[in-house]
Amino acid sequence: MNKKKILFVCVGNAWRSIIAEAYAKALFDEDIEVESGGIRPLGYIPQDVVEVLLEEPVIREKVDISSLRSKPIITDKLSDYSYIVVLSRTIFFAPEGVKVLYFDVEDPAFSDKEFLRQIRDKIKEIVTQVKRVVEEN
């Protein structure tokens, strides 16, 4: 059986999709490969995002935060993914055979930590939903 691959996408790949990647790496089975990317990546992960992620015990215990990177989507590689999870209002065109899941998550870019925590918690719920979908298919 081929390993399932999931790509979490948002615009900047510094807030929403990075948070989703961290939760997915913590919560998904090891036989599911998880990555994230941005349409216009910021190029770095803001310190507030790192701090809010490290508040979560499951992330601290299971994810090497230093391995997370803000990076662009590589369009030539999109057909390698089983699922693409879009975390913004962005319209995303995926190759045939790749399932696309859309979740409209407000952009927390440059917001205060309390709002970022709310977004983090919402994304944790989304990642849990995605996990169920992936495991059922």
Image (cartoon, rainbow, N blue to C red):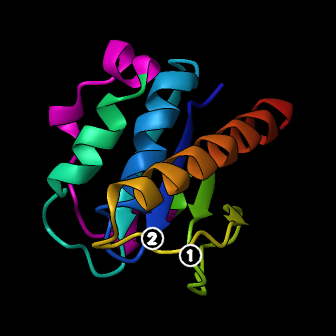
Say whether disc 2 or disc 1 marks the residue closer to the N-terminus.
2
SS under mark 1: loop
Q: Is residue 102 above or below residue 7?
A: below
Q: Quadrant of residue 42?
A: bottom left
Which amino acid type corresponds to the residue marked 2 in the rendered image?
Cys
Q: Residue at position x 54%, y 53% from top?
A: 118
Q: Residue at position x 53%, y 42% from top?
A: 5
The location of residue 22, given as percent across then percent down, is: 40, 37
Numbered-mark total = 2
Q: Quadrant of residue 54?
A: top left
Q: Does 76 appear in magenta?
A: yes
Frontmost residue, 1 versus 29: 29
The location of residue 111, given as percent across then percent down, is: 34, 70
**Which region of the structure is painted magenta?**
57-78
Q: Label 2, on which residue?
A: 10
Label ID, residue 88: 1
Q: Are marks 2 and 1 in contact (CB under 8 Å)?
A: yes
The location of residue 70, given as percent across then percent down, is: 22, 59
Frontmost residue, 130 versus 55: 55
